[in-house]
Image (cartoon, rainbow, N blue to C red):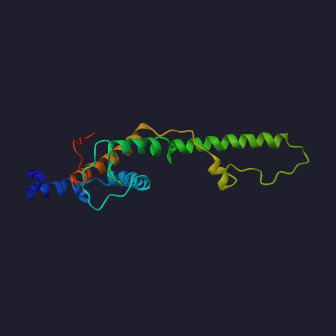
Amino acid sequence: MSNAIEDPRVRAAIEHYLLDLENTQPKNTKRNYRPKQEEWKEWCQANWPAIPDVWPASVPQGQQLPGDLVDEGKLLLFMKEVVASRPPKKGKRVADERKRHLEAREAKRAVKRRRAPSDTIVVGGGGSEYESDSDLELYESTLKLQYNTVRGYVSAIQKLYDEQKSRESILRPGHREWH
């Protein structure tokens, strides 16, 4: 531990400004970062071994940190596998795309109804909603996440990295920041 951290005044400043996020981090930031950080932790739990009891320990360069400890390689893999590869979950663009999809389906149904013989009885004349949950599940969005959404994930996980670094959870020879 360096002399600066041994100084109780410096330790108190670190605790207050870097680690006391309940009082220093804006509410909107907490609300936006929390689900992204939870998603990161769940992904790490599924893909990496747990943090050993003898932690902190030195990890050789090129080897990923255990558990939900943040390192550049894991962050990039998370962004590639989980975030960048999926469509947005909510928002105006999603609603507009879903509406266009419903309208296109309704137009196809209308054409089929017109082509049906006149002695055919149409039951439940087709509303504009999905007929079942399976119809909704079959629908695949073609939208891509926007830059700011992806950047929000990076910022949330970078904040987690900063907290871990401040708490001295990450000790690696020659470890450099990657902001």
Q: Position of residue 102 (x, y in %)?
A: 65, 44
Along the line of sight, the residue nearer the viewer: 98 or 50: 50
Horizontal arrangement in the rendering, residue 148 relative to residue 114 (left or right): left
Q: Residue at x 45, y 38 (%)?
A: 146
Along the line of sight, the residue nearer the viewer: 67 or 38: 67
Residue found at the far front of this picture: 60
Horizontal arrangement in the rendering, residue 127 relative to residue 27 (left or right): right
Quadrant location, the C terminus:
top left
Along the line of sight, the residue nearer the viewer: 77 or 49: 49
Horizontal arrangement in the rendering, residue 14 relative to residue 137 (left or right): left
Q: Residue at x 62, y 51 (%)?
A: 137
Q: Residue at x 13, y 53 (%)?
A: 1
Vertical placement of 38 versus 149: above or below?
A: below
Q: Position of residue 130 (x, y in %)?
A: 67, 51
Vertical placement of 6 versus 146: above or below?
A: below
Quadrant of the image occupied by residue 111 = top right
Q: How many marks?
A: 0
Residue found at the far bottom of this picture: 53
Along the line of sight, the residue nearer the viewer: 154 or 72: 72
Q: Position of residue 53 (x, y in %)?
A: 29, 62
Residue found at the far right of this picture: 119
Q: Position of residue 60 (x, y in %)?
A: 28, 45
